[in-house]
């Protein structure tokens, strides 16, 4: 998850644009994606 956060910060992306940041560990990114989807009410 730190990798994705680093990409967002280093690139100056907004919260919504970070969907396009691909972390090095897909299994962790899937967990992060599901948490964000749950927070937004996406199913």
Image (tube, rainbow, N blue to C red):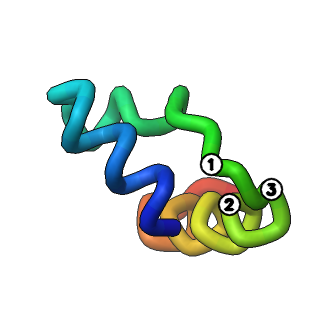
Evaluate if marks 2 and 1 touch, with contact meaning CB atoms under 8 Å apart.
yes
| Vertical placement of residue 32 versus 3, above or below | below
Evaluate if marks 3 and 1 touch, with contact meaning CB atoms under 8 Å apart.
yes
Per the image, label 2 sits on a secondary structure element best described as helix
Q: Nearer the viewer, residue 41 or 27?
A: 27
- In the image, is 35 to the left or to the right of 40? right
How many angstroms separate mark 3 from mark 1 (CA)? 6 Å
Could you say where residue 1 lies in the image, as x and y percent from the top left? 52, 67
Could you say where residue 11 lies in the image, as x and y percent from the top left? 25, 26
Mark 1 crowd level (few <14, some 14–19, many ≥20, 10 Å Cα): some
Query: On residue 10, which mark appears?
Result: none
Mark 3 crowd level (few <14, some 14–19, many ≥20, 10 Å Cα): few
Q: Nearer the viewer, residue 31 or 8?
A: 8
Q: Residue at x 80, y 56 (%)?
A: 26
Decide which of tag 2 and tag 1 comes sooner along the chain: 1
Mark 1 sits on what residue? 23
| Vertical placement of residue 5 versus 14, above or below | below
How many angstroms separate mark 2 from mark 3 (CA)? 5 Å
Quadrant in which residue 43 is drawn: bottom right
Mark 3 sits on what residue? 26
Q: Residue at x 71, y 70 (%)?
A: 28
Badge nearest the viewer, 2 or 1: 1
Q: Residue at x 31, y 40 (%)?
A: 8
Per the image, label 3 sits on a secondary structure element best described as helix
Q: Residue at x 62, y 59 (%)?
A: 33
Mark 2 crowd level (few <14, some 14–19, many ≥20, 10 Å Cα): some
Mark 2 sits on what residue? 29
């Amino acid at each position: 998850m730190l990798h994705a956060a680093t990409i967002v910060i280093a690139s100056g992306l907004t919260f919504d644009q970070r969907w396009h940041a691909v972390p090095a560990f897909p299994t962790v990114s899937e967990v992060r994606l599901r948490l964000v989807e749950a927070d937004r009410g996406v199913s």
